[in-house]
């Protein structure tokens, strides 16, 4: 008991609580988007916006490797007390983010057409999906750069800044949602335009936070200095940067292929199914982003401990984050078991969609208890900069778990789709856990609480 109380609970929650509060604003906004569209007359409005959002967020989520690597690298620079390296991490990430965004804007026509071809769905779903994605794609440079800024702020122990940045951005998005959809009656294009504007607004706020804090730090401690683009684009540094990001990107690509497959396969099962899955996927995101708050805190503490070569601190961070991850996972399962149907009814007024979503709710109740371990271990491995293990686990889970399971279970329709995803999560947690168990034996056998 004494050892348990000596664990860094307070330090973890100082980082985790702001991250949990800020993280859940993302899926909550998705739920609001879904609710705004879900109360329109037809299911295809929600189906079209869901497919269109997946076409765009696939790129944003795929670019999540920038957020992860930036957090790990910034945390390590923070642990090493290297302000210059921290600035280089930020600028490299932003440069890569804008490059990805601009390339996608230039190539938008073939990309959107190919994505919608594979998505399938009714003519109405296809129409509104294209309308949504052709607006949102212009926000990609800002959306991806925002990931870098969030990762950098988190790696520098600025979780409160992350919290307020996300809250302000998402409240802006929410206000514009209500204005454009219910006020101006712009339907699906209103939701897309609201998100586009909010993304650039958030980027401006993020740069302002970093810039003014940088000036304050420079004047007070004389650590903040202007770095040149020659240093930012140093070939050797970029090679190491892309090598790290390569593994995380492959891992994220495998993950997002599963999410996209669920959305697209749902569209092929009918407008009501894709609309019901949209609600359930937002519940899943609410769970994952909340649990990621603990994992994000673990990233920072583990990254700092690794950078400072403090194994005792690292081991304590793993123990306390494991405990609270389990507590939160149990809490999520209880909430969705008790109130899931009521939440679905609030989000959509289309009876057939509500009935379908309620039929598949059991998967959302069960998922937190098996998914929480993979979220936590991802955070730990990001802090340790061990992207290869994350990559291998995800590839095994997706291509030897999810897709074969769906092939065998597809005759069960949407239940088969969710069962395949459940199997994917189980394999992901088991493979990461097995790797960490062996890593732990090798690396920390001489450490003790």
Image (tube, rainbow, N blue to C red):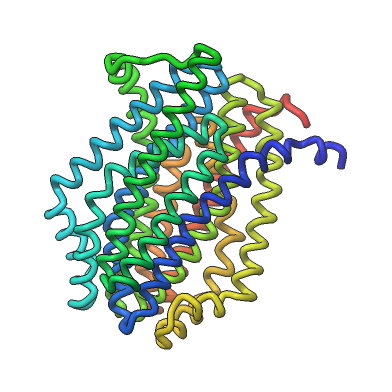
The image quarter containing residue 349 is bottom left
Residue at the extreme top: 222
Residue at the extreme right: 2
The residue nearer to you, when weighing 169 against 59, is: 169
Look at the picture and state if 215 lies above or below 372.
Answer: above
Identified at 38% across, 37% down, the residue is 66
User: At which x and y percent is residue 348?
Assistant: 43, 79
Identified at 47% across, 38% down, the residue is 389
Identified at 63% across, 47% down, the residue is 17
Can the viewer see residue 286? yes
Quick check: 369 left or right of 206? Answer: right
Residue at the extreme bottom: 351
Quick check: 245 left or right of 379? Answer: left
Can the viewer see residue 430? no
User: At which x and y percent is residue 44?
Assistant: 28, 78
The residue nearer to you, when weighing 51 against 139, is: 139
Q: Quadrant of the N terminus?
A: top right
Q: How many marks?
A: 0
The residue nearer to you, when weighing 377 against 46, is: 46
Look at the picture and state if 374 lies above or below 71.
Answer: below
Look at the picture and state if 116 lies above or below 239.
Answer: below
The residue nearer to you, when weighing 135 against 282, is: 135
Identified at 31% across, 61% down, the residue is 53
Look at the picture and state if 114 lies above or below 222.
Answer: below
User: At which x and y percent is residue 18?
Assistant: 59, 45
Q: Quadrant of the C terminus?
A: top right
User: At which x and y percent is residue 294?
Assistant: 60, 46
């Amino acid at each position: 008991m004494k050892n348990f109380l000596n664990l860094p609970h307070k330090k973890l929650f100082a980082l985790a609580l702001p991250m949990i509060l800020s993280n859940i604003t993302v899926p909550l906004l998705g739920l609001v988007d879904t609710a705004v569209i879900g109360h329109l007359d037809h299911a295809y409005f929600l189906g079209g916006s869901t497919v269109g959002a997946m076409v765009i967020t696939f790129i944003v989520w795929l670019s999540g490797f920038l957020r992860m690597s930036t957090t790990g690298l910034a945390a390590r620079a923070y642990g090493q007390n290297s302000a210059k390296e921290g600035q280089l991490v930020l600028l490299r990430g932003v440069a890569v983010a804008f490059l990805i965004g601009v390339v996608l804007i230039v190539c938008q026509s073939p990309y959107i057409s190919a994505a919608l071809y594979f998505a399938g769905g009714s003519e109405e779903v296809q129409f509104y999906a294209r309308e949504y994605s052709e607006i949102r794609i212009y926000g990609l440079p800002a959306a991806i750069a925002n990931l870098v800024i969030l990762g950098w702020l988190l790696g520098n122990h600025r979780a409160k800044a992350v919290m307020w940045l996300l809250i302000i951005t998402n409240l802006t998005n929410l206000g514009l949602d209500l204005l454009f959809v219910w006020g101006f009656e712009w339907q699906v294009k209103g939701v897309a335009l609201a998100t586009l504007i909010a993304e650039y607004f958030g980027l401006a706020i993020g740069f302002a936070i970093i810039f003014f804090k940088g000036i304050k730090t420079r004047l007070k401690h004389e650590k903040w200095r202007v770095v040149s683009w020659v240093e930012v684009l140093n070939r050797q540094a970029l090679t190491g940067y892309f090598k790290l990001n390569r593994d995380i990107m492959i891992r994220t690509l495998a993950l997002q292929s599963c999410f996209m497959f669920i959305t697209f396969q749902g569209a092929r099962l009918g407008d009501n199914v894709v609309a019901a899955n949209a609600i359930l996927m937002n519940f899943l995101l609410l769970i994952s982003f909340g649990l990621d708050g603990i994992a994000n805190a673990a990233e920072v503490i583990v990254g700092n401990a690794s950078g400072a070569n403090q194994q005792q601190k690292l081991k304590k961070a793993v123990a306390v984050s494991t405990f609270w991850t389990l507590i939160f996972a149990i809490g999520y399962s209880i909430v969705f078991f008790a109130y899931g149907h009521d939440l679905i009814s609030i989000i959509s007024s289309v009876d057939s969609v509500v009935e379908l979503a309620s039929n598949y709710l059991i998967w959302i109740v069960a998922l937190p208890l098996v998914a929480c371990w993979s979220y936590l271990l991802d955070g730990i491995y990001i802090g340790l900069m061990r992207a290869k293990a994350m990559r291998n686990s995800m590839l095994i889970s997706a291509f030897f778990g999810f897709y074969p399971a769906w092939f065998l279970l597809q005759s069960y329709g949407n239940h088969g789709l969710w069962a395949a995803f459940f199997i994917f999560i189980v394999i992901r947690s088991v493979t990461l856990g097995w790797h960490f168990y062996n890593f732990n034996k090798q690396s920390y056998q001489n450490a003790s609480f």
